[in-house]
Image (spheres, rainbow, N blue to C red):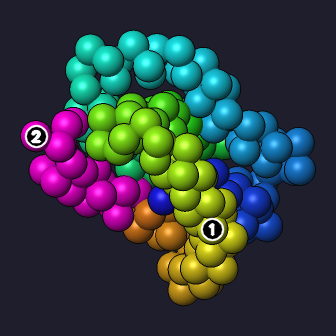
Amino acid sequence: FVEFHRNSPAVLSLRLMADLKAGPALIGLLASAYYYPYALMQLPTGLLADSWGPRRVVSLFFCLAGLGSIAFGLAPTSGLAIAARVVVGLGVSVIFVSTLKFLTRWFRPADYALMTGLFLSLGNLGGLFSAAPLAYLSQGMGWRGASVAIGLATLVLALAMGFLLRNRPE
């Protein structure tokens, strides 16, 4: 779902441009608004994962991503859409580092590199497979409905992570 959020401005760009009366530069800003909080949160994420535990960090911040996606779908102006994308970027920014924390706790050091590689590979597959479903979803529901639907699905995943994940195997 991180890839759905990451790819959404590219997949939805023509619909966004028409609805928000935005040019390519504004769509570029809309897409980049995701990356700034993502980059800024990498160091604090490690500290949060160490102090709060990765389960709490992942589930709380993924809730932010879901709420940001819903706000993006409901945003009446391009300024509010950009602000919503910042919230989405903040929400998904913790997933990578927190997952690495999970991997250190759940797998032997000898298996860590393999599990990290599998995690990265699955993430890249998510990038390949997210575009077409999002395009189909936006054809049926419009870009706003698709953004709200992805946001709601993200909230469901955040709740599931909060209930199902465990910081440590024991």
**Residue 9 colored in magenta in the image:** no
Q: Quadrant of residue 58?
A: top left
Q: Nearer the viewer, residue 143 or 161?
A: 161
Residue, x 55% and y 58% (percent of image)? Answer: 118
Q: Secondary structure at mark 2?
A: loop
Numbered label attached to residue 19? none
Relative to 162, residue 145 above or below: below
Report x, y in % for residue 165.
Answer: 21, 48
Residue matched to label 1: 125
Amino acid type, callout 1: Leu
**Residue 155 colored in magenta in the image:** yes
Q: Residues within 10 Å of mark 2 (few under 14, many from 20)?
A: few
Q: Nearer the viewer, residue 125 or 28?
A: 125
Q: Quadrant of residue 13?
A: bottom right
Report x, y in % for residue 155.
Answer: 30, 54
Is residue 164 left or right of 28 when viewed as pictured? Answer: left
Report x, y in % for residue 97.
Answer: 48, 32
Relative to 119, residue 81 above or below: above
Q: Secondary structure at mark 1?
A: helix
Residue 106 visible: yes
Report x, y in % for residue 137.
Answer: 54, 80
Residue, x 53% and y 15% (percent of image)? Answer: 43
> What's the magenta region?
151-170
Looking at this rendering, what residue extends furthest in the right direction?
24
Prevailing SS of the magenta stretch: helix
Report the mark closest to the observer, 1 or 2. Answer: 2
Residue, x 88% and y 42% (percent of image)? Answer: 25
> Gap between marks 1 and 2, in whole Å?
31 Å
* Quarter of the C terminus within the rendering: top left
Residue, x 46% and y 14% (percent of image)? Answer: 44
Amino acid type, callout 2: Glu
